Image (cartoon, helix red, strand yellow):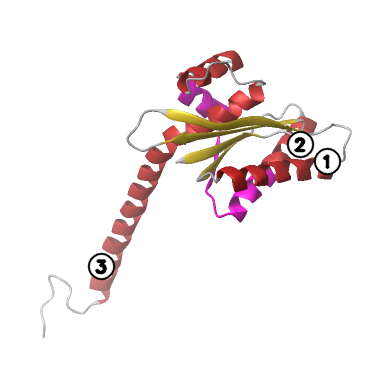
């Protein structure tokens, strides 16, 4: 599986693609970078630049999934708005190609990569460098965060999909059991009744 991780932002949008071969513990970095847009440009132009760059990555590297950071920061509204808008154009680009788009909180990503949901950026970068067997740390931090998102999704997706399948099967089983009970209740020959 190949995942495009995106740490969304207007000024710096981190992008990282990581690949994992089934049956292997090894992760491989396919691509890493940062999409930059000038703060002096109009927001629509900046969003178009992010969208174009992500579209080009999707075309060139053909990932199977897209993983985005889910934002919770409510303190700086102008920053969160730009970040959310950038995340939106990335999600739309993935959806346009029929790719599943997953959202992970910073805490989930930190816990998956470092084992500590409160890890700082330096710890996350260090673990990403180690897990991907890189000779040097990816810079800036947005690039390392994008790789961390991809790694988090690669490790969490199989478990989540298995849980989703189990829940779906349980609901289907419960539905068929309830359907059978309803049919028996409507039938004149339910257990315990005699034919006249």
Residue bearing mark 1: 43
Q: CA distance from mark 2 to mark 1?
A: 8 Å
Residue bearing mark 3: 180
Residue bearing mark 2: 82
Residue 125 lies in the magenta stretch: no
Image quarter hosting the C terminus: bottom left
Depth check, mark 3 against mark 1: the one in front is 1
Q: Position of residue 81 (x, y in %)?
A: 75, 37
Q: Is residue 117 visible in this depiction of the protein?
A: no
Q: Position of residue 26 (x, y in %)?
A: 40, 28
Pointer 2 or 3: first along the chain: 2
Q: CA distance from mark 2 to mark 3?
A: 52 Å
Which of the 4 image quadrants contains residue 23? top left
Image: magenta residue range: 88-113
Pointer 3 or 1: first along the chain: 1
Q: Tag 2, which secondary structure?
A: helix
- Which labelled disc corresponds to residue 187? none
Q: Residue at x 70, y 41 (%)?
A: 53
């Amino acid at each position: 599986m190949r995942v495009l991780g995106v740490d969304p932002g207007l000024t710096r949008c981190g992008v990282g693609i990581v690949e994992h071969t089934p049956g292997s513990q090894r992760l491989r970095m396919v691509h890493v970078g940062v999409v930059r847009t000038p703060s002096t440009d109009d927001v629509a132009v900046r969003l178009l630049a992010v969208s174009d760059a992500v579209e080009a990555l999707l075309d060139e590297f053909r990932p199977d999934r897209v993983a985005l950071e889910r934002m919770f920061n409510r303190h700086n509204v102008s920053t969160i708005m730009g970040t959310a808008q950038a995340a939106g154009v990335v999600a739309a680009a993935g959806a346009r190609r029929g790719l599943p788009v997953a959202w992970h909180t910073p805490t989930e990503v930190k816990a998956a990569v470092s084992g500590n949901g409160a890890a700082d950026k330096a710890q996350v970068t260090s673990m990403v460098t180690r897990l991907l067997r890189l000779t040097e740390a990816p810079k800036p931090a947005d690039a390392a965060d994008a790789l961390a998102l991809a790694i988090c999704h690669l490790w969490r997706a199989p478990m989540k999909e298995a849980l989703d399948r189990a829940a779906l099967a349980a609901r289907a089983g419960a539905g068929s059991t309830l359907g059978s009970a309803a049919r028996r209740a409507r039938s004149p020959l339910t257990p315990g009744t005699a034919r006249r």
